[in-house]
Image: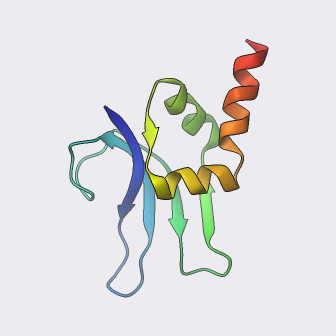
């Protein structure tokens, strides 16, 4: 099963994450299939860089977002764009 989740790449005390698509069984910082964005929780407000078209494509292919990624997608209206595109097809 494919999972969209956060992969930590920051220093100790300064977390920084990549949003990646990976197999559910892989470890948090293990191998991944595709990187679709970045998340910096230390910025004010937290900074998100996201390739929306690739995120929508992976969601259509059946990838399931983790809870933190689900919240990021909801703040960026990714789910509404997936459903809007399905209605137009």
Q: Quadrant of residue 55?
A: top right
The residue most toward the top is: 89
Could you tell whether 87 is left or right of 60 in the image?
Answer: right
Q: Position of residue 82 (x, y in %)?
A: 67, 30
Question: Which residue is painted at 37% across and 88% down in the image?
Answer: 13
Q: Position of residue 14 (x, y in %)?
A: 42, 83
- Name the colour scheme: rainbow
Looking at the image, how many numbered discs can be counted on the residues?
0
For the C terminus, the quadrant is: top right
Question: Which residue is painted at 43% across and 33% down in the image?
Answer: 63
Q: Position of residue 67 (x, y in %)?
A: 47, 54
Question: Which residue is painted at 72% across and 46% down in the image?
Answer: 77
Q: Quadrant of residue 49?
A: bottom right
Could you tell whether 7 is left or right of 76 in the image?
Answer: left
Question: Which residue is painted at 35% across and 68% down in the image?
Answer: 9
For the N terminus, the quadrant is: top left
Q: Position of residue 54 (x, y in %)?
A: 56, 36
The residue most toward the bottom is: 13
Which is nearer the eye, 3 or 21? Answer: 3
């Amino acid at each position: 099963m494919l999972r969209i989740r956060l992969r930590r790449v920051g220093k100790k005390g300064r977390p920084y994450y990549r949003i990646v698509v990976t197999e559910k069984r892989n470890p948090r910082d293990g191998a991944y299939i595709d990187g679709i964005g970045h998340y910096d929780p230390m910025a004010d407000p937290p900074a998100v860089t996201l390739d929306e078209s690739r995120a929508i494509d992976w969601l259509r292919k059946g990838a399931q977002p983790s809870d933190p990624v689900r919240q990021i997608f909801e703040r960026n209206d990714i789910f509404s764009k997936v459903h809007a595109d399905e209605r137009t097809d």
